Protein backbone atom coordinates (compact mmCIF):
# COMPACT_ATOMS: atom_id res chain seq x y z
CA UNK A 1 0.00 0.00 0.00
CA UNK A 2 1.35 3.40 -0.95
CA UNK A 3 0.44 6.71 0.52
CA UNK A 4 0.06 9.89 -1.47
CA UNK A 5 0.91 13.28 -0.09
CA UNK A 6 -1.68 16.00 0.12
CA UNK A 7 -1.86 18.37 -2.82
CA UNK A 8 -0.68 21.89 -2.18
CA UNK A 9 -3.67 23.67 -3.68
CA UNK A 10 -2.11 27.14 -3.66
CA UNK A 11 0.91 25.85 -5.58
CA UNK A 12 -1.37 24.27 -8.19
CA UNK A 13 -3.35 27.50 -8.61
CA UNK A 14 -0.14 29.53 -8.90
CA UNK A 15 1.24 27.13 -11.50
CA UNK A 16 -1.90 26.95 -13.66
CA UNK A 17 -3.34 30.44 -13.14
CA UNK A 18 -0.89 32.78 -11.35
CA UNK A 19 -2.60 35.53 -9.38
CA UNK A 20 -2.29 37.66 -6.30
CA UNK A 21 -3.95 36.31 -3.18
CA UNK A 22 -4.59 37.81 0.22
CA UNK A 23 -4.60 36.01 3.56
CA UNK A 24 -8.08 36.14 5.04
CA UNK A 25 -8.97 36.77 8.66
CA UNK A 26 -10.41 33.30 9.05
CA UNK A 27 -8.75 30.94 11.54
CA UNK A 28 -8.93 28.12 8.98
CA UNK A 29 -6.03 29.62 6.97
CA UNK A 30 -8.16 30.81 4.08
CA UNK A 31 -6.82 32.86 1.22
CA UNK A 32 -8.84 35.20 -1.01
CA UNK A 33 -8.29 35.89 -4.71
CA UNK A 34 -9.90 36.30 -8.12
CA UNK A 35 -11.42 33.03 -9.31
CA UNK A 36 -9.17 31.21 -11.82
CA UNK A 37 -12.26 29.63 -13.42
CA UNK A 38 -14.71 32.48 -14.05
CA UNK A 39 -12.15 35.31 -13.59
CA UNK A 40 -14.90 37.63 -12.30
CA UNK A 41 -13.75 41.22 -11.75
CA UNK A 42 -15.66 43.34 -9.28
CA UNK A 43 -16.37 47.02 -9.81
CA UNK A 44 -14.74 47.91 -6.49
CA UNK A 45 -11.45 46.25 -7.41
CA UNK A 46 -11.58 43.83 -4.48
CA UNK A 47 -11.49 40.51 -6.29
CA UNK A 48 -11.91 38.34 -3.23
CA UNK A 49 -14.76 36.04 -4.19
CA UNK A 50 -12.63 32.88 -4.48
CA UNK A 51 -11.52 31.36 -1.17
CA UNK A 52 -8.94 28.65 -0.63
CA UNK A 53 -8.58 26.66 2.55
CA UNK A 54 -5.05 25.30 2.41
CA UNK A 55 -5.39 23.09 5.49
CA UNK A 56 -8.53 21.36 4.16
CA UNK A 57 -7.48 21.52 0.47
CA UNK A 58 -10.83 23.11 -0.50
CA UNK A 59 -11.77 26.03 -2.71
CA UNK A 60 -15.00 27.95 -3.26
CA UNK A 61 -16.06 30.64 -5.72
CA UNK A 62 -19.01 32.73 -4.55
CA UNK A 63 -19.74 33.90 -8.12
CA UNK A 64 -19.68 30.84 -10.34
Image (spheres, grey):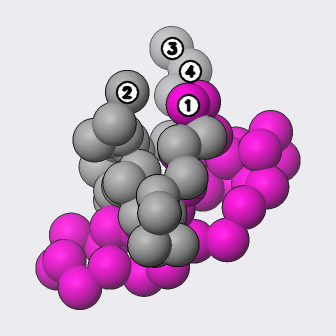
The crowd level at tag 1 (other Cα within 10 Å; few <14, some 14-19, many 20+) is few
Q: Is residue 27 magenta?
A: yes
Q: Eyeballing the image, is 15 above or below 22?
A: above
Q: N-terminal of the two: label 1 or label 2? A: 1
Image marks 3 and 2: residues in contact by CB distance under 8 Å: no
Relative side of 52 to 17, left or right: left
Q: Distance between the residues labelled 3 and 2?
A: 38 Å
Q: Quadrant of the C terminus?
A: top left
Which residue lies under the disc numbered 1? Answer: 38
Image marks 3 and 1: residues in contact by CB distance under 8 Å: no
Give percent across and percent down for residue 43. 47, 63
Which residue lies under the disc numbered 2? Answer: 64
Q: N-terminal of the two: label 3 or label 1? A: 3
Which residue lies under the disc numbered 4? Answer: 2
Choose top left, top right, bottom left or bottom right for residue 48: bottom left
Which residue lies under the disc numbered 3? Answer: 1
Give percent across and percent down for residue 51. 36, 55
Give the number of the disc on residue 16.
none
Q: Give the range drawn in magenta.
A: 9-38
Residue situated furthest top in the rendering: 1
Q: Does the magenta stretch include residue 10?
A: yes
Amino acid sequence: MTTTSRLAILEIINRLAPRNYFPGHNPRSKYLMRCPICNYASREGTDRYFTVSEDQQLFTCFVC
